[in-house]
Amino acid sequence: MRILPRVVLLILAMGVLGLGPAVASVPTAWLQVGDGPLVFLNDWVPFGDGWFLNFTQQTSEYTVSGNVATIGDPYVSYGVAFNNNSGGALAFNFGILDPTIPVTSPTTVYASYSGSGTDVTGDGFSITPLYPDMDGDGLAEMQVTLLNDAVNAGVDVGQGHIYGPGVPGHSNDLGNYFSGPMAGPAGGPWTSLGTNLWFSLSGNDIATLNGYSSVATVPVPEPASLLLMGGGLVGMAFVARRKRG
Protein backbone atom coordinates (compact mmCIF):
# COMPACT_ATOMS: atom_id res chain seq x y z
CA MET A 1 0.00 0.00 0.00
CA ARG A 2 0.85 2.80 -1.27
CA ILE A 3 6.28 14.65 20.99
CA LEU A 4 5.31 11.09 22.53
CA PRO A 5 1.52 10.96 23.12
CA ARG A 6 -0.03 9.66 26.31
CA VAL A 7 -0.89 6.33 24.72
CA VAL A 8 2.77 5.77 23.72
CA LEU A 9 3.91 6.59 27.25
CA LEU A 10 1.39 4.08 28.56
CA ILE A 11 2.61 1.37 26.19
CA LEU A 12 6.23 2.09 27.11
CA ALA A 13 5.34 1.76 30.77
CA MET A 14 3.73 -1.60 30.04
CA GLY A 15 6.99 -2.73 28.45
CA VAL A 16 9.05 -1.59 31.41
CA LEU A 17 6.74 -3.44 33.79
CA GLY A 18 6.82 -6.58 31.66
CA LEU A 19 3.06 -6.67 31.04
CA GLY A 20 3.16 -8.19 27.56
CA PRO A 21 4.14 -11.44 25.86
CA ALA A 22 7.53 -12.26 24.38
CA VAL A 23 9.26 -10.05 21.83
CA ALA A 24 8.46 -10.92 18.22
CA SER A 25 10.47 -10.20 15.08
CA VAL A 26 11.63 -6.69 14.19
CA PRO A 27 8.72 -4.55 12.86
CA THR A 28 8.77 -2.60 9.60
CA ALA A 29 7.84 1.05 9.11
CA TRP A 30 7.76 3.15 5.95
CA LEU A 31 6.95 6.60 4.62
CA GLN A 32 5.99 7.81 1.16
CA VAL A 33 5.35 11.47 0.36
CA GLY A 34 3.58 12.47 -2.84
CA ASP A 35 4.98 10.54 -5.79
CA GLY A 36 8.33 10.10 -4.08
CA PRO A 37 10.02 6.79 -3.28
CA LEU A 38 8.96 4.48 -0.49
CA VAL A 39 11.41 5.05 2.38
CA PHE A 40 11.85 2.32 4.99
CA LEU A 41 12.55 3.42 8.56
CA ASN A 42 15.01 0.91 9.97
CA ASP A 43 16.40 2.23 13.25
CA TRP A 44 14.41 -0.06 15.54
CA VAL A 45 15.78 -0.81 18.98
CA PRO A 46 14.55 -3.48 21.42
CA PHE A 47 12.74 -2.05 24.41
CA GLY A 48 11.25 -4.19 27.16
CA ASP A 49 9.19 -6.87 25.44
CA GLY A 50 8.87 -4.99 22.15
CA TRP A 51 10.49 -2.47 19.83
CA PHE A 52 10.87 1.29 19.67
CA LEU A 53 11.63 3.58 16.72
CA ASN A 54 12.55 7.27 16.73
CA PHE A 55 12.93 8.79 13.28
CA THR A 56 13.16 11.97 11.22
CA GLN A 57 12.81 12.27 7.44
CA GLN A 58 13.43 15.69 5.92
CA THR A 59 13.57 17.39 2.52
CA SER A 60 13.01 20.97 1.38
CA GLU A 61 9.31 20.12 0.95
CA TYR A 62 8.54 18.29 4.20
CA THR A 63 9.71 17.06 7.58
CA VAL A 64 8.24 13.97 9.21
CA SER A 65 9.42 12.96 12.68
CA GLY A 66 8.11 10.89 15.53
CA ASN A 67 8.09 7.68 17.51
CA VAL A 68 6.66 4.20 17.08
CA ALA A 69 6.31 1.52 19.77
CA THR A 70 5.27 -2.11 19.49
CA ILE A 71 5.57 -2.82 23.19
CA GLY A 72 3.56 -5.82 24.37
CA ASP A 73 3.20 -7.34 20.89
CA PRO A 74 0.76 -7.30 19.16
CA TYR A 75 0.14 -3.64 20.07
CA VAL A 76 1.24 -0.83 17.75
CA SER A 77 1.26 2.87 18.69
CA TYR A 78 2.74 5.99 17.12
CA GLY A 79 3.07 9.75 17.58
CA VAL A 80 4.21 11.57 14.42
CA ALA A 81 4.41 15.20 13.28
CA PHE A 82 3.94 15.83 9.55
CA ASN A 83 5.26 19.22 8.35
CA ASN A 84 4.29 20.24 4.80
CA ASN A 85 6.73 23.02 3.89
CA SER A 86 5.58 23.23 0.26
CA GLY A 87 3.09 25.71 -1.17
CA GLY A 88 0.57 23.02 -2.13
CA ALA A 89 -1.07 19.94 -0.68
CA LEU A 90 1.06 16.81 -0.19
CA ALA A 91 -0.01 13.19 0.26
CA PHE A 92 1.57 11.30 3.15
CA ASN A 93 1.50 7.51 3.42
CA PHE A 94 2.88 6.19 6.71
CA GLY A 95 2.66 2.58 7.82
CA ILE A 96 3.83 0.10 10.44
CA LEU A 97 3.84 -3.68 10.03
CA ASP A 98 4.39 -5.68 13.21
CA PRO A 99 5.13 -9.42 12.82
CA THR A 100 3.05 -10.73 15.70
CA ILE A 101 3.01 -13.88 17.70
CA PRO A 102 0.33 -15.86 15.79
CA VAL A 103 -3.20 -14.96 16.89
CA THR A 104 -6.11 -17.23 15.97
CA SER A 105 -9.86 -16.65 15.82
CA PRO A 106 -11.87 -15.59 17.65
CA THR A 107 -10.09 -12.27 18.14
CA THR A 108 -10.79 -8.87 19.63
CA VAL A 109 -9.52 -5.77 17.79
CA TYR A 110 -9.48 -2.09 18.66
CA ALA A 111 -7.85 1.15 17.54
CA SER A 112 -7.68 4.84 18.41
CA TYR A 113 -6.68 8.03 16.61
CA SER A 114 -6.30 11.66 17.63
CA GLY A 115 -4.44 14.73 16.46
CA SER A 116 -4.04 18.45 16.09
CA GLY A 117 -3.51 20.67 13.06
CA THR A 118 -1.55 23.93 12.86
CA ASP A 119 -2.34 26.57 10.23
CA VAL A 120 1.16 28.01 10.07
CA THR A 121 0.52 30.89 7.64
CA GLY A 122 -3.14 31.54 8.47
CA ASP A 123 -4.43 30.72 4.99
CA GLY A 124 -6.53 27.74 6.16
CA PHE A 125 -5.87 24.16 7.15
CA SER A 126 -7.15 20.91 5.69
CA ILE A 127 -6.39 17.23 6.16
CA THR A 128 -8.14 14.77 3.85
CA PRO A 129 -8.24 10.95 4.24
CA LEU A 130 -7.16 9.12 1.07
CA TYR A 131 -8.27 5.59 1.94
CA PRO A 132 -11.74 4.82 0.56
CA ASP A 133 -14.58 3.78 2.86
CA MET A 134 -13.46 0.38 4.16
CA ASP A 135 -15.82 -0.23 7.09
CA GLY A 136 -19.14 0.71 5.52
CA ASP A 137 -19.76 3.96 7.42
CA GLY A 138 -19.79 6.04 4.23
CA LEU A 139 -16.66 7.99 5.20
CA ALA A 140 -13.11 7.87 3.92
CA GLU A 141 -10.60 6.42 6.36
CA MET A 142 -7.69 8.24 8.02
CA GLN A 143 -6.18 5.24 9.84
CA VAL A 144 -6.78 1.58 8.99
CA THR A 145 -5.77 -1.57 10.83
CA LEU A 146 -4.82 -4.59 8.74
CA LEU A 147 -4.21 -8.22 9.65
CA ASN A 148 -1.65 -10.15 7.60
CA ASP A 149 -1.08 -6.92 5.63
CA ALA A 150 -4.27 -7.45 3.60
CA VAL A 151 -7.36 -8.16 5.73
CA ASN A 152 -9.16 -5.12 7.16
CA ALA A 153 -9.68 -5.53 10.91
CA GLY A 154 -12.79 -3.32 10.87
CA VAL A 155 -11.55 -0.70 13.34
CA ASP A 156 -10.89 2.19 10.95
CA VAL A 157 -10.74 5.56 12.69
CA GLY A 158 -10.35 9.27 11.96
CA GLN A 159 -12.00 11.80 9.67
CA GLY A 160 -10.99 14.75 7.52
CA HIS A 161 -10.87 18.28 8.91
CA ILE A 162 -11.02 21.80 7.47
CA TYR A 163 -10.74 25.17 9.27
CA GLY A 164 -9.63 28.75 8.66
CA PRO A 165 -8.33 30.94 7.22
CA GLY A 166 -7.51 32.71 10.42
CA VAL A 167 -4.70 33.69 12.74
CA PRO A 168 -1.27 32.40 11.62
CA GLY A 169 -0.03 29.62 13.86
CA HIS A 170 -3.48 28.67 15.11
CA SER A 171 -3.72 25.04 16.24
CA ASN A 172 -6.98 23.12 16.14
CA ASP A 173 -8.08 19.78 17.61
CA LEU A 174 -8.63 17.17 14.87
CA GLY A 175 -10.74 14.98 17.11
CA ASN A 176 -10.32 11.84 19.18
CA TYR A 177 -11.65 8.61 17.67
CA PHE A 178 -11.87 5.13 19.11
CA SER A 179 -13.18 1.85 17.70
CA GLY A 180 -13.65 -1.39 19.59
CA PRO A 181 -13.11 -3.61 21.33
CA MET A 182 -15.00 -5.61 18.73
CA ALA A 183 -14.85 -9.05 17.18
CA GLY A 184 -12.09 -9.31 14.58
CA PRO A 185 -12.35 -10.99 11.18
CA ALA A 186 -12.79 -14.75 11.12
CA GLY A 187 -9.82 -16.81 10.01
CA GLY A 188 -6.16 -16.66 10.73
CA PRO A 189 -3.81 -17.39 12.18
CA TRP A 190 -2.97 -13.70 11.99
CA THR A 191 0.81 -13.28 11.93
CA SER A 192 1.11 -9.51 11.40
CA LEU A 193 -0.64 -6.36 12.56
CA GLY A 194 -0.50 -3.29 10.32
CA THR A 195 -1.40 0.32 11.16
CA ASN A 196 -1.57 2.67 8.17
CA LEU A 197 -2.14 6.40 7.65
CA TRP A 198 -2.83 7.88 4.20
CA PHE A 199 -3.93 11.49 3.85
CA SER A 200 -3.40 14.80 2.07
CA LEU A 201 -2.19 17.81 4.09
CA SER A 202 -2.56 21.43 3.00
CA GLY A 203 0.55 23.44 2.16
CA ASN A 204 2.69 25.16 4.82
CA ASP A 205 0.84 23.36 7.61
CA ILE A 206 1.55 20.82 10.36
CA ALA A 207 -0.44 17.78 11.51
CA THR A 208 0.53 15.98 14.71
CA LEU A 209 -1.15 12.57 14.76
CA ASN A 210 -1.31 9.81 17.36
CA GLY A 211 -2.66 6.31 16.86
CA TYR A 212 -2.92 2.87 18.38
CA SER A 213 -4.03 -0.58 17.14
CA SER A 214 -4.27 -4.01 18.74
CA VAL A 215 -5.47 -7.54 18.10
CA ALA A 216 -5.80 -10.23 20.75
CA THR A 217 -7.12 -13.75 20.99
CA VAL A 218 -10.43 -13.92 22.83
CA PRO A 219 -9.95 -16.39 25.70
CA VAL A 220 -12.39 -19.31 25.63
CA PRO A 221 -13.24 -20.29 29.24
CA GLU A 222 -12.85 -23.92 30.27
CA PRO A 223 -15.98 -25.71 31.60
CA ALA A 224 -14.75 -25.31 35.18
CA SER A 225 -14.24 -21.59 34.63
CA LEU A 226 -17.74 -21.28 33.18
CA LEU A 227 -19.14 -23.00 36.27
CA LEU A 228 -17.30 -20.61 38.58
CA MET A 229 -18.43 -17.65 36.50
CA GLY A 230 -22.04 -18.81 36.68
CA GLY A 231 -21.76 -19.29 40.42
CA GLY A 232 -20.37 -15.77 40.75
CA LEU A 233 -23.28 -14.32 38.79
CA VAL A 234 -25.75 -16.21 40.94
CA GLY A 235 -24.03 -14.87 44.06
CA MET A 236 -24.19 -11.29 42.72
CA ALA A 237 -27.90 -11.70 42.02
CA PHE A 238 -28.45 -13.01 45.57
CA VAL A 239 -26.63 -10.00 47.07
CA ALA A 240 -28.64 -7.64 44.88
CA ARG A 241 -31.91 -9.17 46.06
CA ARG A 242 -30.85 -8.83 49.71
CA LYS A 243 -30.00 -5.15 49.15
CA ARG A 244 -33.43 -4.54 47.65
CA GLY A 245 -35.16 -6.37 50.47
Image (cartoon, rainbow, N blue to C red):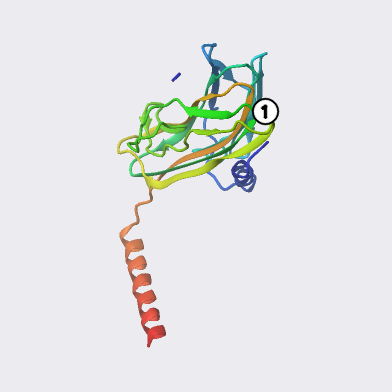
In this view, the residue in front, 195 or 82, is: 82
Q: Is residue 68 above or below residue 12?
A: above
Q: Quadrant of residue 115?
A: top right
Q: How many marks?
A: 1
Residue 142 place in picture, x, y as percent: 47, 32
- Quarter holding the C terminus is bottom left
In this view, the residue in front, 64 or 238, is: 64
Q: Name the residue furthest front.
A: 166
In this view, the residue in front, 156 or 8, is: 156
Identified at 49% across, 43% down, the residue is: 177
Q: Which residue is mark 1?
A: 120
Residue 195 place in picture, x, y as percent: 48, 31
Left or right: 17, with 222 as reference point: right
Can residue 178 be seen in this snapshot? yes
Q: Name the residue furthest bottom.
A: 245
Amino acid under disc 1: Val
Q: Is residue 65 above or below residue 214?
A: above
Q: Quadrant of residue 52?
A: top right
Residue 185 place in picture, x, y as percent: 33, 38
- Quarter holding the N terminus is top left
